[in-house]
Image (cartoon, rainbow, N blue to C red):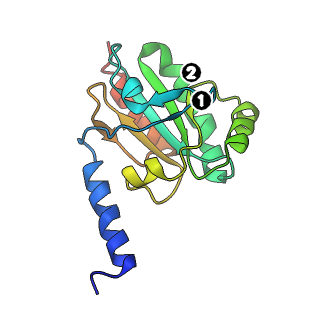
Amino acid sequence: MQQTDALVRLKENAEQKMKTDIGQPFIDIAQPNADGEQVSLESVVRNPANKYVLLDFWASWCGPCRGEIPNIKELYDKYHAKGLDVLGVAVWDKPEDTQAAIKELGIVWPQIINAQQIPTELYGIQGIPHIILFAPDGTIAARDLRDEAMKEKVAEVMKNVK
C-alpha cells in the first residue's frame, strides 16, 4: 500500500516541506524573468545588501493571489528602501497571462514567469498564493504568509534592520 502513487507523492511532498521549513536554507531555482533573462533565487536571496526577501508564488488566474498583491505592494512601498526585496514567481500559468496581470495589477517588483510546477515541487507547495520570507542569511524565516500575518511578520523582522 505504501507504494501507491498517491502515498508516494504525499511522502515526497512531506519530505520537500521538511527541507524547506522555517530555519532551512533556500533551494535555488533559475527561470526566465519578464524580459526572458534567467533569474536565480540565489541572486535575490543571497544578496550583498543583506536584505529580507518575500517570495510570492502566484498565478494570474488565482483570485486569492491577486488579492494578496495590494498587501505585498504595501509592504514593498513601506520597507523596500529599508531592506526588503520582493520576488514574484508565477506558477501554473501561461506567460502571456502573467505578463498581462503584471501590467494590470501594477506590479513593480521583479518576476519569474512561466516557472510552472518546478518551484512548487521544490518547496512542497500544494496551493497558491504561497508567500515565503527569507532572512538575509538565505534561511526561511516564515512561510505560507498571508494578509495581516504577513504584515505583522515583515514589520517584526524589519524593526531589527539597521
The residue positioned 31% from the left and 55% from the top of the image is 17
Residue found at the very far bottom of the displayed protein: 1
Position above or below: 79 against 102: above
Residue receiving disc 2: 77
The N terminus sits in image quarter: bottom left
**Image side of residue 103 versus residue 76, left or right:** right
In front of the other: 9 or 156: 9
The residue positioned 26% from the left and 50% from the top of the image is 19
CA gap between label 2 and label 1 equals: 6 Å
Which three-letter amino acid code belongs to the residue tagged 2? Asp
| Residue 157 falls in image quadrant | top left
In front of the other: 100 or 153: 100
The residue positioned 36% from the left and 29% from the top of the image is 42
**Image side of residue 7 versus residue 60, left or right:** left
For the residue carrying disc 1, how many other residues have a C-alpha within 10 Å: few (<14), some (14-19), or many (20+)?
some
**Image side of residue 147 versus residue 102, left or right:** left
* Callout 2–callout 1 Cβ contact below 8 Å: yes
Residue receiving disc 1: 73
Position above or below: 93 against 82: below
Which three-letter amino acid code belongs to the residue tagged 1? Lys
For the residue carrying disc 2, how many other residues have a C-alpha within 10 Å: few (<14), some (14-19), or many (20+)?
few
